[in-house]
Amino acid sequence: MNIQRPIFALVLAGSLAAMALPASAQLTEQVPPPRLKWSFAGPFGKYDQAQLQRGFKIYREVCANCHSMDMLSFRNLADAGGPGFSEAQAEAVAAEYKVKDLDDLGNPIERAGRLADHFPAPFANELAAKATHGVAPPDMSTLAKARSYSRGFPWFVFDMVTQYQEHGPDYIAAYLNGYKDAPKGFVLPEGGHYNEYFPGHTTAMPPPLQAGQVTYDDASPQTAEQYSKDAAAFLMWAAEPHLDARKRIGFQVMIFLIVLAGLMYFTKKKVWSAVH
Amino acid sequence: MSGHATYQPTNRVLQWLEKRLPIGGLVHSSFIAYPTPRNLNYWWAFGGILSFMLGVQIITGIVLAMHYTPHVDMAFKSIEIVMRDVNFGWLLRYLHANGAAMFFLAVYIHMFRGLYYGSYKEPREVLWILGVILYLLMMATGFMGYVLVWGQMSFWAATVITNLFSAIPGVGDAIVTWLWGGYAVGNPTLNRFYSLHYLLPFVIAGVVVLHVWALHVTGQNNPTGIEPKSDQDTVSFTPYATIKDGFLMVCFCILFAWFVFYIPNFLGHSDNYIPANPAVTPSEIVPEWYYLPFYAILRSIPNKLLGVIALFGSIGILAFLPWLDTSKVRSARYRPLFRQFFWLFVIAAVGLGWLGTKPPEGIYVILARILTFYYFAFFLIVLPLLGIFEKTKPLPNSISESVLGAKA
């Protein structure tokens, strides 16, 4: 047994060393985006209504020109835990959109949008989008959860404990603001744009946000950096509209379970005291 | 489930029922009077936790099925509707998705516990084999459930896994076409996966009944690995085991709730929030974490057919464990050498899991081959030989002696 111990320790050390090596090698594949502060991070996180409203403005004036957002309806704008529009405001937003429908005789018409309507897509179908843009711009409904980056070992273990879940918005904010001149020797395919954070660096989308492009209703700085953050926060809400409720209920559940576990523990001790 | 002599209901209605259907006596003898070894530690609580998780999965699954549409054009969308518009749909869906992960976490602990304490040895061979069948059924059910989401990773996982059968010489391609119900993963595939994903949990529940039945015939193993000899060695299931299992179950629920409420997408892959697209292959295709060790074994072998054989062999070999382990001593407590090889096996299994996430190239392939070799060597070389050469420590005379001796 005494001879076995060192062998065991050696194998353990070897396997740990092997695990640590490739984690750093992997970083070259995708540049990790900087970690930003998000109001919705952590166990008590909540969306910042003003930020979601700003983000919605960017979506509407910039993103929506090319991107659909099929899963969301105008009524969602007035949902609890969302951008905090009143129902009347959401209705007014809907009315500014033209929605395709049929009249009573079955003839195709265009009418003003209503709360129950989904956000209309900027193109008739995916093929049309592809023909216009070269690549069909992805639907934005689940985008913030569909984008991520690998943190590698051992960081992903810590993320489990620290509840770091904002890979998507961090990446999107970095990507929106990550356009640069291609470094020397980098061959940019035609129609491609160099982006520091996009995997492979060649993205089809031209730089979407320039300073001063969208006029904010509040005093937030109208910089590309702020736009990127607000758009990313909005997309997170679009992908996870019940996050506020989830974290709020989660805290209540945790308190309940911890108290129950305590009661169970002392009951167990009492029951078993006769045996031990 | 044997005998119900101690159960005498005082209530007249229950007396009447007991004469006609002795179900009260069955419950009483199985879950109240049933003697359990007094020295069971918390690793023995995972059987109860697994039953609880099966219940959670079936209940959340049935409600989710009410809102789900098994059609290639609507599956992804119907789940998003669950997440957005169904009252507490997000909770049901996150409970179900993370519940599967928790189910596997618990089953792995349960299996490693059985391995460590030699719970598979005579007379518990059938109990163990039923467990291996349960594990296989769980893997099939979990895989099909993952496909139902119909995201990119669902679709490509389905493609990769079903394609494994094409390695079978001669009839492989015909089998794959038959599995798909077409010439590619498509609507018929999604439909049959949905049907089977609904069916298999009830098959699991049925085999669980057999598993518990077999357990109640042989009685539980315990950390010493020696059989109870007198009433002093056991305590009744209720209240002793129920409260102990219950306490750990609540602790397990805290972990479960942590995932569901705070990091619900941690264990998933972000690509599965992109609707399935047969025209675009994701940059990496990785299975859920609980299949990763087997995925690494599959990819560590350059020949496809041999890889598939190794994959199924790595699970199938578990069924032969009772006969591969030749040692007469059950518990690793009294097997100093086995204990070290056991922990190496745990490291190899976790290491293979990590390698399953890595591309099969360079150092990763070499490491995967070493660990795959150890995985099989553990069962085929180490365990048979240890029984012959290992010098085990003396066993205590009885369970109560080991408990009291430890206290003194």
Image (tube, coloured by chain):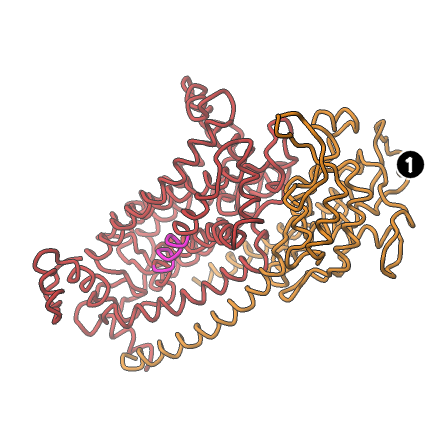
Chain colours: A orange, B red
- Quadrant of the rendered structure where residue B229 is? bottom left
Which one is nearer the viewer's eye here, B146 or B126?
B146
Query: Please, what secondary structure does the residue beneath circle 1 have?
Result: loop
Which one is nearer the viewer's eye here, B267 or A275?
B267
Residue B226 picture location, percent across and down: 24, 63
Q: Check the image and report above or below for B408 versus B276.
A: below
Number of residues whose C-alpha sits closer than 10 Å to that of mark 1, classed few (under 14), some (14–19) or many (20 or more)? few
Give the position of the N terminus of chain B as an image quadrant. bottom left
Residue A118 picture location, percent across and down: 66, 41
Give the position of the C terminus of chain B as an image quadrant. bottom left
The answer to whether residue A242 is left or right of residue A230 is left
**Residue B26 is one of the magenta-drawn residues:** no
Magenta range is: B48-56
Residue B76 picture location, percent across and down: 56, 38
Q: Check the image and report above or below for A66 versus A89.
A: above
According to the picture, the residue beneath numbered tag 1 turns out to be: A184
Residue located at (24% from left, 47% from top): B126
Q: Residue furthest front?
A: A105
